[in-house]
Image: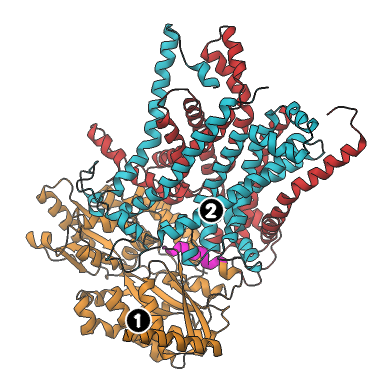
Chain colours: A red, B orange, C cyan
Amino acid sequence: MTSAKPVRRELTEKQLAFWMLLPAALLLLAVVVYPVGRLIYTSFFDYSNGPLNPPYRGTGNYQQAIHDPDVWNALKVTLQYVLITVPGGMLLGLALALLANLPYRYKWPVRLSLLLPWSMSMAFAALIFAWFFNSDYGVVNDILRRLGMTAPNWLSSPQLALLATSWAIIWKTSSFVALILLAGLQTIPEEMYEAADVDGATPWTKFWQITLPLLKPAIIVALIFRTITAIQTFDVPYIMTSGGPGNVTTTIAMLIQQQTLQYGNFGYGAAIAMVLFLFSMIITGFYLRHIQGDS
Amino acid sequence: MKKMLAVGLTLFVSCLCSAQAATTLRVFVGGQERPDVMKEIFVQYMKAHPDVNVQLEVGGATSEAQQQYLSTVLNSADSSLDIFLLDIVRIAQYAQSGWAEPLDSHIPNKAALMKQYLPAYAAANTYNGKLYALPAFADAMFLYYRKDLLTKYRFAPPKTWDDMVKIAQTITQREKDPNLKGFSFQGAPIEGTVCSFLVPYWSAGGQLSSTQALDPNNAKKSLQFLSDLVKVSKVAPSNSAEIKTDDTRRLFQSGNYVFAHLWAYGWNRFQEDTDSQVKGKVGVVKLPAMTGGKAATCLGGWEWAVSSYSKNKAAAADLVQFLSSKQVSKYLAVNASNLPAHTSLYNDPDILKVNPWFKDALPVVRSAQQRPVSPRYPQLSTTINSNVNAAVAGVKSVDSVVSELQSKVPALLK
Amino acid sequence: MTVATQALPQGRSQAQRRARAWIWLAALIVVINGLFPLLWMVLTSLKPEGELSRLPITYLPNHATLQNYATVLGFDATNPAPKPFWRWFTNSVIISLSSAFLSVLISSLVAYVVARLNIKGKGIIMGTVAAISMFPLITLIVPLFQTMRAAGLLNTYFALIIPYTVLSLPVCTLMMVGFFQQIPQDLENAAMVDGCTRFQALFKVVFPLAAPGVFTALILAFVNAWEEFLLALTLIQREDMRTLAVGITLYQGEFSFPWALISAALVLAMVPVAVVVVAFQERVVGGLTSGGVKG
């Protein structure tokens, strides 16, 4: 836009923005604003004696959450999942995207392994992996036994349970990352590589100096959503280990599910959900600032 | 043709009636509770009550999935459901939450009615002195054993857990089958694991209810027993902390176990599944006792409750009484092989013809104890099962589990 | 093409041969990791239930059978009440497609505002949109149920289409912002000089150029809706209106989990989606980008 733009034009931009944002705004009003408002409101009430006229509790639920060892344990577990499955999913996703983008003739196996896990829901992926890691009938232990190794109890030893569940999460979510990155890769102009070729760049330098920087917006988008979903990890440990052994794989989202829909402690569950929200907000705010800085 | 005519006529009549003033009752049952059989029962009821139209709503397959749905609907004070089928452990929660309607005023002769049922049901369905539900069918934990193997080595079914361990050890050693193991029980962090813990605890003399606090000595005995099964006698496999209810069924059914600790549904699967390796080789008895103690088992089953948001409570209560009646109980026993909650039906020749083993089940269900009745039962259950799971997995020591249970359980029994 | 063409080692130097070997190794790992669990699921679905608890475990089915598929599809005469698999499948397709299109449409408008218009408060818009995804669905479910009941939408497709549209709004918007930002402003200006309105320019120039992003967003939104379980379980209770994600879980019992049967249902649920998704990728994304965005 040039500086010669008339004032009327400025107004149209605002109007245009209004009309373009309107559908999203209406949708959010309809299905997000009320539920979130309700959630915040609920978090100040005490449901522990049932949902009939719950007494006001002020910040009591929040204080209880801060002093609840189960909440701290769940935060620790959740953080472990974030630290394992986010980098894991990103790396595997990047590898998938790069491989799928190579101009080989027979790339359908790579494309299939990129897309098929995505067409399977997280819960069903968890079921498949639970069967996969089954101590008696699982294929993983069978292979280990055939190789003469001891077959461990994947889902009932602390580290292995974390590993097996993380594997399932990475398997499923790397597809999501790869899809976003693949789309990003396809917008990188070919000319940039041609120019680099003229300069005699190696594949490595091209990757580091062209691919990665230009892929940054896509990487950040993938990273934001991978992190947010990792913070909400639920289905996989819920199905594969039920949070065990003990509470080694009980995540914060599982705690919220238990408190609200199983125990009926809607107020306390809402307070934990708000803590989770703030946690996500801080991390995402950090990423978003990066995006804004770029544009 | 005649049948079609009859059906058409019934439909026509019921349309006429519903046009007049019919009461519509919506009944919620889980996807696993044989909705097909339930539908037929409703048809019978509607024939006798042409002014009532009963509709079936089928929920998720597991008790937890149903709980998620029901707690959402009921928290919204929704009146679309009139009756729901509840897992026995949830009655107190639904009563305390004001979701289930007290039935006392709708049932003229409560004391006499409750006497027809197995003794534990009256207590399990009562909260703060009021009756909130009526039993649909019964369930209990049994000890399944390999009759063929026990006969081969001349053992009688074990009366104590120590016997069970010895028999299992002897048979697994002599059979020389590398895949044969001794005993399967539930140790995963799930509801069944609460029973795995409570059965030896009760048997050792422990009690657990709002008036009887957790007894640390017996809790320790029970946990030590479970932990020793896995680590000392090795009668139970090292992955016991992963075993969920149906894993036990699958493992025993594949012929790889001498004993199994399981709900009633196992029997029909062992005897009737085409792939069962133990067909005709299974015996079922009461669970063993701790040495010097009395045998105990966990009561299960499903209960009919009326929603307190229902707009037709009287009609709903009437239907619930019908659904819990001897007649329907018998129908369910014959057509869905559900254990009846009515004591007298265990001698019913029609039922025994289809399910001869119900004869053996009677002493077991008679002695079954209910898990603690508490509005916070779901939380109590998670607390117990995740701790027991930790002890079985060896993540926590038996002593630290006992002290954690001692500190957490009292608040959950209030 | 893009990075690929260039990264592909064409020369004969040792470094390039080594790079090629690494690529092959990476592809092998990624493909085995991605497809083996699925292959295992297919094999499981062909086994009779009893074969699953035989030791040692079998890899190829001893007695391959299509019985599980027949049961899922209701061809099994012994089954008194077959489940309406295709009906559930159709429901899922309708709901997922509608919400995916709506989500992409609405989010592209928001993304356009953020990427292109000269207004204040973009940070707030982006922040709000991202924040939607930070509340675990579990915590919003009671108020959502109340909203849908008040609107009389329970047990209709809309009960799910509306929240699913919102569910995918954040990821679609953030992705599209990245894509729109990469499209040169000059192209759009040129179109407007040629007499296009801003809206026309959006649909005729920006959209086609952002095609990889648009289609990836469609796939992401489609699968988000396809796999969602919790809302689908709660907002739809009529059996013939259920979605497949919920329907498949109805093949299990309170305790019993028929692995072979559920594997067959999973395969049936996955194959058509996979075909559509792969076709999308191959035809549309692959095709359009060869034209590429030339800066």
Q: Is residue A190 left or right of residue C283?
A: right
Give amino acid for label 2.
Leu
Mark 2 secondary-structure assignment: helix
Q: Up-down: is B345 above or below B410?
A: below
* Subunit under mark 1: B
- Quadrant housing the C terminus of chain A: top right
Q: Which residue is mark 2?
A: A255
Q: Which mark is residue B119?
A: 1
Give amino acid for label 1.
Pro
A283 or C250: which is nearer to us?
C250
Please report the residue visible at 25 percent of the width from the left and 64 percent of the height from the top: B269
Tell me the chief SS of the magenta region: helix
Q: Dot 1: few (<14), some (14–19), or many (≥20) neighbours within 10 Å?
A: some
Residue bounds of the magenta highlight: B61-72
Please report the residue visible at 69 percent of the width from the left and 34 percent of the height from the top: C206
* Of the two numbered discs 2 and 1 in the rendering, the one whose residue sits closer to the viewer: 2
| x, y percent for residue A137 | 27, 46
The answer to whether residue C135 shows anywhere in this view is: no
A153 or B82: which is nearer to us?
B82
